[in-house]
Amino acid sequence: LAKTTQPISMDSYEGQEVNITCSHNNIATNDYITWYQQFPSQGPRFIIQGYKTKVTNEVASLFIPADRKSSTLSLPRVSLSDTAVYYCLVGFVTGRRALTFGSGTRLQVQP
Amino acid sequence: GAVVSQHPSRVICKSGTSVKIECRSLDFQATTMFWYRQFPKQSLMLMATSNEGSKATYEQGVEKDKFLINHASLTLSTLTVTSAHPEDSSFYICSARDHGQGGTYEQYFGPGTRLTVT
């Protein structure tokens, strides 16, 4: 299973763009990159998933370079409600193995 | 998106008793469900993989006789914490994979169950 490395914590202010980078040097060919958000005492919530290049949805963008050894989650114009822990997960999503969580990045958004 | 529910959302039990936590996939069939445990300020740790109609697969270090998992149908998996001790107090989160058949195998998470053993 590909191991992921993320910054332990990040601070930002409301209205700013936040970029969280995740390293996954031993990502396998069939692995996808998935980002989840978790608030205290809640289950993780799916944010975005991608395989290569760029993926964008209504809440975030995911940038994946050609070598796929890292990825960057971009949150545009964060608000206080974006304060949460963000997890980068790498795995074969069409398989039967569970996604494995790393340590995550604790994002604190201040007014 | 697909919804996974858990019941109860929180439970307090006395040391030595057993507690059952239910995990349901509400609008899709899940041949595979996963159980995670999360201690305060820590990440989610996979405990076991539950496969419909067969025995669960436990991660290293997780006692299968203490954490009983039953996946009797495509929409329900249960985790029973037997002879609970205070150190079992934690946040238990289940997750389910879509059945497939043209759908994806995206992993959806339940809201979690807070277990406190006194």
Image (spheres, coloured by chain):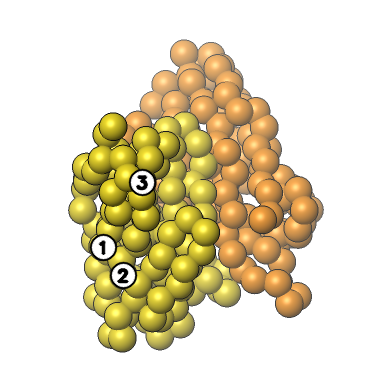
Q: Mark 3 packing: few (<14 Cα in 10 Å), some, or many (20+)?
A: some
Give the percent coordinates (x, y) of residue B45. 40, 48
- Taking the image as shown, residue B69 lies to the left or right of residue B45, namely right
Mark 3 or mark 1, earlier in chain: 1
- Taking the image as shown, residue B90 lies to the left or right of residue B94, namely left
| Residue that carries the numbered disc 3 in the rendered image | A78
Mark 2 or mark 1, earlier in chain: 1
Identify the image quadrant of residue B112: top right
Residue contact between numbered discs 2 and 1, judged by CB atoms under 8 Å:
yes
Q: Where is B45 relative to A3, above or below?
A: above
Q: Mark 1 packing: few (<14 Cα in 10 Å), some, or many (20+)?
A: some
The chain displayed orange equals B
Residue A21 is tagged as 1
Q: Nearer the viewer, residue A80 or B21?
A: A80
Viewer-nearest of labels 3 and 2?
Answer: 3
Give the percent coordinates (x, y) of residue B90. 44, 30
Q: Assign the N terminus of chain A to one quadrant of the image.
A: bottom left
User: At 39% from the left edge and 68% from the top edge, which residue is drawn?
Assistant: A62
| Residue that carries the numbered disc 2 in the rendered image | A71
Viewer-nearest of labels 3 and 1?
Answer: 3
Q: CA distance from mark 2 to mark 1?
A: 6 Å
Are the residues flagged by discs 3 and 2 from a single subunit? yes
Give the percent coordinates (x, y) of residue A84. 37, 40
The chain displayed yellow equals A
Could you tell me the amino acid type at mark 3? Val
Element assignment for label 3:
loop
Q: Where is A65 relative to A90, above or below?
A: below
Q: Count numbered badges in the picture.
A: 3
Could you tell me the amino acid type at mark 2? Ser
Q: CA distance from mark 3 to mark 1?
A: 16 Å
